[in-house]
Image (spheres, rainbow, N blue to C red):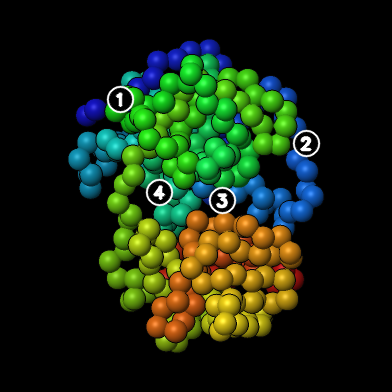
């Protein structure tokens, strides 16, 4: 099994407590206060492309459905369990330290389909075992090399080592790529700026496609919507008909044929084909999946309903897409 390794010692990797939808938050020398000016909400503003899970390793076993893969059971400080799948394609720092009792932080793409079971079972795209002497940031970076959650801006210099997962020199563009960034000090600005020590460009992989998406039910507030089916876009993101679900949640939906623009309620709008959502006059909000028009039906990513319409649940469970909005929200 050929896992990628980086030898390191001393300070612990900066990690976020285990959270299903929270952005990974690195520790820097001094944490700046987050401004809430012009934000839809703090949650929308700080939305990483990657989710992170941190805990102490309790058990390691072979994951038999994939050659050479490991199932690593961890528990966070609140004793909440998560099973992390580490494969030969997972970029792993300090894989040789993988052992019961060590700490583990795993990173997975928030836009990939996730079937919820208990304990949650997560396929990691990157992972850190034990302690290293640098901060770690895993995210998608734009053309200004700012992370998706607006937390970190990269100032690449000649001293920055830039490699592919196989440690060969990477000479392509870094923007709109999933990066593992190792860095030391950073500024107190928003976003924080740093001269990274090393950048690892994660390989572009094939999207995880669900075989029978059309056979799945859409369940909103425990009611199955008859005739309403999800679809999956070319990147593997589950997309759901916006009108049927939004109206079931109590929102009016409008359509502007000339502009190809949809409005939901009084404050939310978007255009077909553009990953650029506007909420309360704040535009440029991305969900990493543009709305689709499928056979005359507008479909949006499943995360749309939790991000904008206050759904307390928006996930896949077995053969159902479950969306729930708690009373009072």
Q: What residue is shown with label 2? A: 33
Camera-side mark, 3 or 2: 2
Q: Residue 129 versus residue 180: which sits nearer the camera?
A: 180
In the picture as drawn, the residue positioned furthest to the top comes out as 10
| Label located before the other in sequence (1 or 4) | 4
Q: Are marks 3 and 1 in contact (CB under 8 Å)?
A: no
Q: Are marks 4 and 2 in contact (CB under 8 Å)?
A: no
Q: CA distance from mark 4 to mark 3?
A: 14 Å
x%, y% of residue 79? 54, 39
Q: What residue is shown with label 3? A: 21
Q: Residue at x 46, y 32 (%)?
A: 180
Q: CA distance from mark 4 to mark 2?
A: 34 Å
Observer able to see residue 42: yes
Residue 313: image quadrant is bottom right
Secondary element at tag 4: strand
| Label located before the other in sequence (3 or 2) | 3
Q: CA distance from mark 3 to mark 2?
A: 21 Å
Residue 289 position (above or below residue 24) = below
Secondary element at tag 3: loop
Q: Residue 62 versus residue 191: which sits nearer the camera?
A: 191
Q: Quadrant of the N terminus?
A: top left
In the picture as drawn, the residue positioned furthest to the left comes out as 67
| Label located before the other in sequence (3 or 1) | 3
Q: CA distance from mark 3 to mark 1?
A: 32 Å
Badge 3 crowding class, 10 Å Cα cut-off, few under 14, some 14 to 19, many 20 or more, is some
x%, y% of residue 250? 66, 80
Q: Residue at x 40, y 48 (%)?
A: 121
Observer able to see residue 302: no
Q: Are marks 3 and 2 in contact (CB under 8 Å)?
A: no
Q: Quadrant of the C terminus?
A: bottom right
Q: What residue is shown with label 4? A: 121
Q: Which mark is residue 168?
A: 1
């Amino acid at each position: 099994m050929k896992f990628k390794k980086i030898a390191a010692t001393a300070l612990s990797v900066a990690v976020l407590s285990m959270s299903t939808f929270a952005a990974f938050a690195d520790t820097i020398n001094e944490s700046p206060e987050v401004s809430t000016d012009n934000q839809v909400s703090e949650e929308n503003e700080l939305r990483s492309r990657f989710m992170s899970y941190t805990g102490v390793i309790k058990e390691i076993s072979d994951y038999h459905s994939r050659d050479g893969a490991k199932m690593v059971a961890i528990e966070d400080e609140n004793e909440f369990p998560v099973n992390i799948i580490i494969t030969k394609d997972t970029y792993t720092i300090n894989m040789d330290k993988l052992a019961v009792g060590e700490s583990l932080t795993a990173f997975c793409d928030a836009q990939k389909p996730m079937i919820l079971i208990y304990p949650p079972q997560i396929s990691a795209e990157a992972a850190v075992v034990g302690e290293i002497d640098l901060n770690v940031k895993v995210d998608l970076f734009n053309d200004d090399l700012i992370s998706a959650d607006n937390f970190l801006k990269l100032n690449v210099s000649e001293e920055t080592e830039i490699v592919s997962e196989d440690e060969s020199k990477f000479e392509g563009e870094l923007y709109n790529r999933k990066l593992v960034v190792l860095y030391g000090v950073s500024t107190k600005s928003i976003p924080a700026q740093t001269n990274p020590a090393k950048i690892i460009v994660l390989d572009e992989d094939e999207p995880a496609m669900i075989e029978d998406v059309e056979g799945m039910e859409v369940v909103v507030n425990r009611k199955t919507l008859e005739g309403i089916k999800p679809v999956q876009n070319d990147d593997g993101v589950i997309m759901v008909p916006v009108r049927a679900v939004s109206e079931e949640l109590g929102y009016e939906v409008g359509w502007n044929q000339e502009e190809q623009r949809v409005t939901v309620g009084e404050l939310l709008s978007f255009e077909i084909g553009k990953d650029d959502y506007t909420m309360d006059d704040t535009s440029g909000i991305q969900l990493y999946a543009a709305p689709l028009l499928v056979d005359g039906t507008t479909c949006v990513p499943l995360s749309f309903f939790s991000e904008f319409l206050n759904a307390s649940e928006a996930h896949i469970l077995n053969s159902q897409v479950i969306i729930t909005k708690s009373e009072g929200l």
